[in-house]
Amino acid sequence: MSYQAVEEKIDLTKAEEILDQYREIRGPLIPVLQKIQDAYGYLPRPVVELIAEHLGVTPHQVFGVITFYAQFHLEPRGKHILRVCCGTACHVKGAKQITDKVEEILEVHPSETTKDRLFTYEQVACIGACSMAPAMMIDDHTFGELDSGKVEKSINKYRMKDNDREQRAESEEKE
């Protein structure tokens, strides 16, 4: 996974506002990273460089923290996070078929985001839904006793919701 192979223009205003809140606080790197990631959805390279400059550390030190903690992301993430459980119960009950179907529908591999940035796909060790195996989550919603049809139906439900929202927004703009 390459980090921002294509350099994009990033508006640093949000990051600067957040950094201003931490000027007099000692050791604020993690809360700064959390707030800035909330604002941007990920941690773009120009923002990481700005953080380092404002906090008086090297970009290398900031990247060290970012890559140590799984909560931080250097690539844009999807609007929805889809997690397929690959734990023991799900594995035994067919997680492989579920992961294959998700990859086929979304046209991505684990830890990748769809081209439309609607979904980021992750395979996880356990989602705590063993009695519903095989299972997956989309955001905070758990789907269990899955088969290929249920996977497709669940993903399409999220796609339709987002299409409906976009269409309503477009019609409101025209009015």
Image (tube, grey):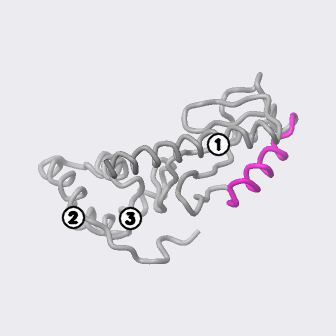
- Nearer the viewer's eye, disc 2 or disc 1? 1
Mark nearer the N terminus (3 vs 2)? 3
What residue is shown at x 86% (from left), y 39% (from top)? 94
Residue span colored magenta: 93-108
What residue sits right under mark 1 in the picture? 83
Q: Which residue is mark 2?
A: 56
Q: CA distance from mark 3 to mark 1?
A: 23 Å
Quadrant in the picture for residue 115: bottom right
Determine whether the residue tagged by mark 2 lies in a helix, strand or loop. Answer: loop
Which SS type dominates the magenta stretch?
A: helix
Q: Position of residue 63 (x, y in %)?
A: 41, 63
The type of residue carrying mark 3 is: Pro
Q: Residue at 46% of width from left, 77% of height from top?
A: 6
* Residue where numbered disc 3 is placed: 44
Decide whether residue 57 is among the magenta residues: no
Q: Earlier in the sequence, mark 2 or mark 1?
A: 2
